[in-house]
Amino acid sequence: MIKKQAIQYWLTLIIGLFTTVSCIDPYKVTVQATQSYLIVEGTITDLDEPQTISIFETSETANFKSSQFTSTISPKSSDIIPVSKAKVLVIENGQKTYELFESQAGYYSTPLNFVGTIGSSYKLIIEKSTGERYESTEEKMFSVPEIGTLYDKFNQKGIKDNNSSTGNIATNDIYIDYIDPATERNFYRWKWTSYELQNICASCKQGYYERTGNTATSDGKCIQDIRLPGFNYYDYFCEALCWDIFQGKEIDIFSDVYTDGQTQYDKVVAQIPVYQSNPCLVVVQQMSLSANAFRYLKLIEDQSENTGTLADTPPAPIKGNVTNTKNNNEIVLGYFSASAVSEVRYMMNRQNTVGAVKDGLFKYQTRRDPTPESESDERPNIPFAVCKPSVSRTAIAPKNWQFGR
């Protein structure tokens, strides 16, 4: 389920609503697919960290639906299938080849010694186990200016949120300054990731949590007990610090065609929901884009914004830069790109927030207060739960984390 949630998040980056302000209200749509689509996404960067390419495909009967809150068009998680056992290569400057390994089903990571280089060009090659071969266009990695000043402001109005009883959730808005290089065309993209402390690591419905041992790698699972009511929940505290990982679902892009060489002030690059009053770590990335990557994302933006009239063109899948070498007419979703990255890791203490409570993330996610299991003669020692690593959770303190709970 975690993998499908991750790729569903990613697909919102392909066919989602951008943060660009518009006076046109989007409308809800449903796109009925009549075939399976390959979904390829990944960005080679100059950061010294693993680079990951995701390769999934949809079922032939997948429905692509939009949300009234995000106006994204994405398939159901049950319609997403990882593409495993593929041979995946990244070619640098047409000469050096790096073979990626499958780190999880559908996710392929670069070797440990790989770091992208500004000025170099990269191409992706995929050979599925069924024999189909796919290639991307070459993407050049352009430089990107450094992020200057970064600060946050509390925003009580916040953003729309269908998990909130009020329909909105307050945010900490992140602002940055940067200096656009003069006499050159630049295309930008901004992304953010936040790490939120989680204090509940397991929940058992009509059952109890048990572990096979007391080591950090001990497995934990729920054991059903039919003596308990069917609606009964017991929630278990994490044995150590644990972080849930959130990533911005909006696509935020910009061209300097009208602002070449000008310093940009107070650019909003993230709106971090205030789930709780605990401090969190926010990672902001300012990325370079090629002209082709920018045009691709702009096409998605144009399709995502419409008035909902009968004259509008129905949403349709947009072909990326990956093609089937023997069938150029096949539509492959997603885009393989290369980006230089200016990254700031910002520890946000949330002292400027109003109304948030400590350790409130679990209640936000489940819409209920945690119910810890009480000690009993039968179970005198209640176990702590393991913080199981996934694409949306980690027990490893993120780089630049400064505080405890």
Image (spheres, rainbow, N blue to C red):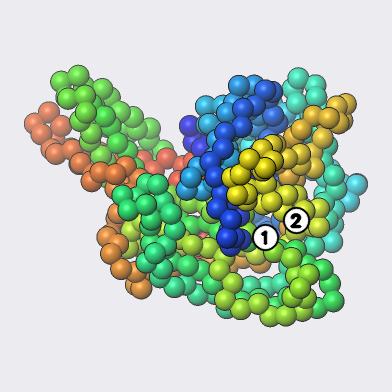
Query: What is the x, y in percent for residue 152?
Result: 47, 72
Instruction: Examine the image and state in which quarter residue 18 appears.
Output: bottom right
Disc on the earlier residue, 2 or 1: 1
User: Of the residues shown, which amino acid type is indicated by label 2?
Assistant: Phe
144 or 222: nearer the viewer: 144
Asked if residue 351 is positioned above or below residue 307 in the image, the reply reads: below
**Residue 197 appears left or right of 110:** left
Query: What is the x, y in percent for residue 267?
Result: 59, 72
**Residue 299 appears left or right of 252:** right
**Residue at horizontal 31%, vertical 49%?**
165
User: Of the residues shown, which amino acid type is indicated by label 1?
Assistant: Ile
Task: Answer whether residue 325 is visible to the viewer in this image.
Answer: yes
55 or 61: nearer the viewer: 61
**Residue at horizontal 85%, vertical 44%?**
137
Q: Mark 1 and mark 2 in contact (Cβ < 8 Å)? A: yes
Query: What is the x, y in percent for residue 257?
Result: 78, 70
Question: Which quadrant of the figure contains the C terminus?
Answer: bottom left
**Callout count:** 2
Asked if residue 386 is positioned above or below residue 33 in the image, the reply reads: below
Question: Which mark is drawn over residue 134?
Answer: none
Q: Which residue corresponds to mark 1?
A: 253
**Residue at horizontal 76%, vertical 39%?**
319
Q: Which residue corresponds to mark 2?
A: 294
- Other-residue count near label 2 (Cα within 10 Å), few / some / many at <14 / 14–19 / ≥20: some
